[in-house]
Amino acid sequence: MTTTQQKAHATNTGLITVLGDHSPATEQTLQGDELLIQLYNLLEPSSLLDIQHEIAPTTGEHAGVKQQTTGTVGVILHNRIFEAISLLCIKPNDSGLPFVTDTSQSCALFLGTPQSDYELVIVDNYLDGVKLAKHFAHEQIIVAVSPTPYLFLDTVKHFAHDTQVTIFPSIEHKDKVKKQFAGCNVKVVIAPLGVMTHLECGKSYTEILSFDDTQIIDLELADWAKPKPINHTLPPVTSITKNMLPEPLYNYAMNSAERLNVSLEFVAVPLLVALGSVVGTKVAIMPKRYDDWDIVPNL
């Protein structure tokens, strides 16, 4: 087992131990919190946990330090192989950001069960994630949410290792997103009014993709420039003439070339290099016709 695998195993084992300490959340636990109620209805039964004491994360920046998680509702975050990696602790009816027990490893909240043939859409906030999950409930699409907005970049790149990730940036963030995810297995969908707006207006995802003004960009392919045709015609090579070599060398090289049935250059070039090494003189070869780039063989 590698160091990385050992760390992942330890993290997974530690989190599972923490999960066993808490009971499933009930509707009463949610205290009327709109986001929690929607998560409660979207996720599998027993997916939300009633956190009744302070949690000391086993890994990450808060490792070993008890956090003020009492009275929060916990939601499990998974990595790209769907291992439980971290816990999202949401305080009902609190406007602050939820607490994430471990931000050192990339993970996300899946609003449904991932399927290999489903499109994976990742967003950076839970409210949008819930709305999209509802709209895509009958589509072959799974929605995931990065633990926090500032972890969105790392989250998308993490999941793009194994599958194509779809994101819905606004038009003003197009260039920034293309730069951030250049070469990654990421598909960008930019609709005229934004994907969310069109969905809320009753348009289907298929209709949105078919709009003339909708931009669909595959950043894995966009990173490569369009291939240029290869020039199959090689430029002519200047032949060695008699006045370019001392007469004895020219005569020897020409005689050898004729007997070997090869071009004069085939004999003359290595001959000059070899003689240069013998007499301690560097012999330079200029392989390019139109510049002064030279090669000095080192024997």
Image: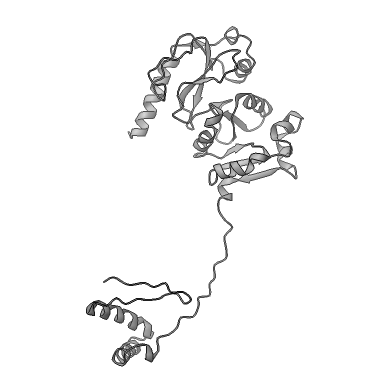
Coloring basis for residues:
one colour
In this rendering, the answer to whether 226 lies above or below 89 is below
Task: Provide residue 219's location: percent of width, then percent of height.
Answer: 58, 46
Position of 188 with respect to 183 (left or right) is right
Tell me if residue 262 can be seen: no
Residue at 34%, 30% in the rendered image: 6
Task: Provide residue 62's location: percent of width, then percent of height.
Answer: 42, 21
Residue at 58%, 36% in the rendered image: 117
Outermost residue toward the right in this view: 201
Q: Quadrant of residue 274?
A: bottom left
Decide which of 259, 182 is in the foreground and name it. 182
In this rendering, the answer to whether 229 lies above or below 122 is below
Task: Provide residue 75's location: percent of width, then percent of height.
Answer: 52, 19
Decide which of 239, 159 is in the foreground and name it. 239
Tell me if residue 76 can be seen: yes
Quarter containing the N terminus: top left
Outermost residue toward the top in this view: 28
Task: Provide residue 100's location: percent of width, then percent of height.
Answer: 49, 22
In this rendering, the answer to whether 248 lies above or below 63 is below
Residue at 36%, 81% in the rendered image: 266
Position of 179 with respect to 139 (left or right) is left
Q: Quadrant of residue 273?
A: bottom left
Quarter containing the C terminus: bottom left
Position of 280 with respect to 250 (left or right) is left
The mark total stands at: 0
